[in-house]
Amino acid sequence: MKLSHLGLTAFYECARTLNMTQAARQLGLTQSALSQRLAQLEEEVSTTLFIRDSKGLILTETGERMLRFSEMNAGLEEELLRDLKGKKGELAGNLRIAGFSSIMRSMIIPALAPLLRKHPAIHLSFLSYEMAELPQVLSSSRADYVITDYEMNKRGISQEILGYEEYVVIESSRLETPEDIYLDHGPEDNATEAFFSAQGKIPPYRRSFMGDVYGIILGVEEGLGRAVMSRHLVEENRKVKILRGFKSYKRPITLHYYERPFETELSRRVRAELKKSI
């Protein structure tokens, strides 16, 4: 069986936009013609690729797999065209990298900046999410790579440890700070609990939520509470001080991506730069 090229093109545009009207406009089709192509493709694979509701399109599990195939196919096609045009070695293409806020701005963007400066035709999207959201971000193909502080260990997903993030306890170096208040992102942030669990004893403490990692650091600077924080984010910050007397606690910075039979040169170079720089 061979999949229809027209059907795959229609699917890919719908999967990228999750909007029939927008996809039809991009392809220069009527919505009726677009619907027919999708229906034909779904008949070819004998399953549903989208769930249609009032808010738009939702990919099914098979649809998510089809999107990963379409993205790989588009990347390889773009790479081949560049080679045929005599631009071999010149990197281009699109990749989306998602991760948690404490490393995206401080580690991931700086690690890839030299590559982006050298190859301006590359378009990378850097996306920050809460840790609990990242597995779904990967499975729904909202990102090509996802970076977490733990290993997912899921079938079909490759994972590579890029390095380790060390956590420390900080408080304001200028202002009196309550010792029983710890600042976190939000209710699902488990950094403080995990840190003290690793110490072997969880002291009684109250939690305040600051929205993101940089809000936490600002809150500590202003004496609103202590925090468990990545060492690399605060080592040069004179407004906070690192408290001593705790055991070393580290978490793995882990890159996750779906296994694919073929990989573009851009993907290989991005992974190599991350492993080299972190």
Image: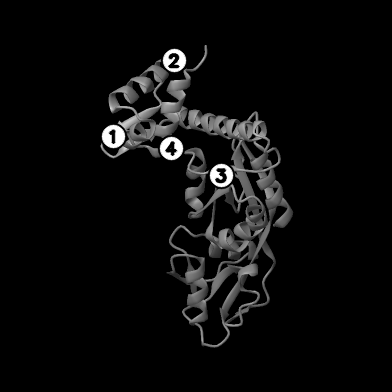
Q: Amino acid at mark 1?
A: Asp
Question: Which sits earlier in the primary sequence, circle 2 or circle 1?
Answer: 2
Identify the mark at residue 44; answer none if there is no mark.
Answer: 2
Tell me the CA gap for discs 2 and 4: 21 Å
The colour scheme is one colour
Q: Are marks 2 and 4 in contact (CB under 8 Å)?
A: no
Q: Percent from the top left, x then y, of residue 91?
A: 65, 43
Residue 165 image position (x, y, % from top left): 65, 61
Depth check, mark 2 against mark 3: the one in front is 3
At horizontal 65% and vertical 77% (from top left) the residue drawn is 236
Mark seen at residue 95: 3
Image check: 47 left or right of 163? left
- Residue 188 at least partly seen: yes
* N-term mark: 2 or 3: 2
Of badges 4 and 1, nearer the viewer stands 4
Please identify, in this view, whether the residue under mark 1 or under mark 3 is nearer the observer.
Answer: 3
Residue type of the residue flagged with mark 2: Glu
Image side of residue 228 versus residue 245, left or right: left
User: On residue 53, which mark appears?
Assistant: 1
Could you tell me which secondary element the residue under label 4 belongs to?
helix
Q: What is the number of the mark on residue 126?
A: none
Residue at label 4? 16
User: What amino acid is found at the position of numbered circle 3 in the picture?
Assistant: Leu
Earlier residue among tags 4 and 1? 4
Quarter occupied by the C terminus: bottom right
Q: CA distance from mark 1 to mark 3?
A: 28 Å
